[in-house]
Image (cartoon, rainbow, N blue to C red):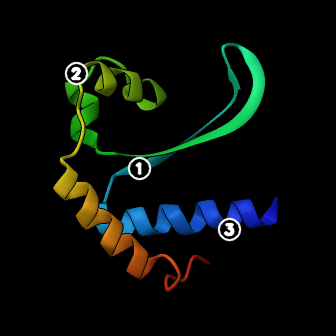
């Protein structure tokens, strides 16, 4: 469990450095079709301007952004991944 906590801390620190969000949400699900079966983590950066733009704040923001298909381009995803790969092991998360 400690390793999972350290991993989540490293990932959120990496997201914070690259994207500079106002907040980062970590969601956890452990069901598929309302039956326990797997662990699913979503780590979502959020910016205050999104909270003003969409109806629901905080965890429900994910649903609202999915409804309008708010997705980064493949180029932005690739750029983020390259930056994250270089940073994730080098950040001091203490």
**Residue 23 marker:** 1
| 7 left or right of 82 in image | right
Position of the C terminus, as image quadrant, is bottom right
Mark in front: 3 vs 1 = 3
From what the image shows, is residue 93 above or below residue 70?
below
Dot 3 crowding, Cα within 10 Å, few <14, some 14–19, many 20+: few
Q: Earlier in the sequence, mark 2 or mark 3?
A: 3
Q: Position of residue 84 (x, y in %)?
A: 39, 71
Position of the N terminus, as image quadrant, is bottom right
Q: Quadrant of residue 20?
A: bottom left
> In this view of the protein, which residue sits in the foreground, 74 or 47?
74
The residue where tag 2 is placed is 68
Residue at point 32% right, 54% down?
Answer: 21
Q: Earlier in the sequence, mark 2 or mark 1?
A: 1
> In this view of the protein, which residue sits in the foreground, 6 or 49?
6
Mark in front: 2 vs 1 = 2
Q: How many marks?
A: 3
Q: Position of residue 5 (x, y in %)?
A: 71, 61
Report if the CB atoms under discs 2 and 1 are less than 8 Å apart: no
Residue at point 18% right, 47% down?
Answer: 73
Q: Secondary structure at mark 1?
A: strand
The residue where tag 3 is placed is 6
Residue at point 71% right, 24% down?
Answer: 31
Dot 2 crowding, Cα within 10 Å, few <14, some 14–19, many 20+: few
From what the image shows, is residue 8 above or below residue 87?
above
| 87 left or right of 30 in image | left
Question: Looking at this rendering, what residue extends furthest in the top direction?
Answer: 34
């Amino acid at each position: 469990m400690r390793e999972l906590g350290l991993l989540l801390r490293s990932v959120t620190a990496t997201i914070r450095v690259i994207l500079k969000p106002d907040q980062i949400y970590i969601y956890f699900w452990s069901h598929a079709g309302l039956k326990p079966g797997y662990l699913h983590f979503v780590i979502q950066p959020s910016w205050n301007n999104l909270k003003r733009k969409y109806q629901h704040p905080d965890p429900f923001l994910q649903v609202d952004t999915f409804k309008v298909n708010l997705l980064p381009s493949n180029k932005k995803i690739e750029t983020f991944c390259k930056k994250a790969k270089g940073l994730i092991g080098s950040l001091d998360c203490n």
